[in-house]
Image (cartoon, rainbow, N blue to C red):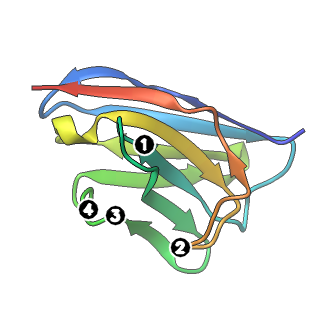
Amino acid sequence: QVQLVESGGGSVQTGGSLRLSCVGSGRTFNGYGMGWFRQAPGKEREFVGGSWTVGGTRYADSVKGRFTVSRDNAKNTVYLQMNSLKPEDTGIYYCAGDFNFGGDPNYWGQGTQVTVSS
């Protein structure tokens, strides 16, 4: 059974930082896209950032310069470092595995809540 398990969510004030982690199990994601999506209250889920062997890392315009996606293939893990957080970054953050940029992931984590207060 393939699983993606996130950790690291929480509550911070505007300008704060959080680091999310996502560990994959049941298959390797080495050579496949891994990344993050988020869903704000009342909004659709949106792409945040991702990492690909070919193509490097890509980000949504709203997080460029503030968020960084990195991965440790040996640990089958992807990270999301979030700095300079804003209230509009509040939402449920989902880890995603095995997807192309602009495409739908084949695997999802269960989500972790991030709340940024002003």
**Residue at the limit of the structure toward the right, as seen here:** 1
**Does dot 3 land on a helix, a strand or a loop?**
loop
Q: Are marks 1 and 3 in contact (CB under 8 Å)?
A: no
Classify 65 as above or below 26: below
Task: Work out whether mark 2 precedes mark 4 in sequence or the reverse, and give the earlier one.
Answer: 4
Q: Which mark is residue 64?
A: 4
Residue at which label 1 appears: 39
State which tag comes first along the sequence, 1 or 4: 1
**View extreme (front): residue:** 42
Q: Quadrant of residue 83?
A: top left
Name the N-terminal-most of marks 1 and 3: 1
User: 10 Å neighbourhood of mark 1: few (<14), some, or many (≥20)?
Assistant: some
Q: Name the front one of labels 2 and 4.
A: 2
Q: Three-letter amino acid code at disc 2?
A: Gly
Q: CA distance from mark 2 to mark 3?
A: 11 Å
Write down the residue under mark 2: 102
Identify the residue at horizontal 46%, vertical 38% (top origin).
Answer: 93
Instruction: From the image, state whether disc 1 or disc 4 is nearer to you.
Output: 1
Q: Is residue 76 visible to the viewer in this orientation of the structure? A: yes
Q: Answer yes or no: do the residues labelled 3 and 4 have beta carbons within 8 Å?
A: yes
Looking at numbered disc 4 in the image, what kind of residue is underneath it? Lys
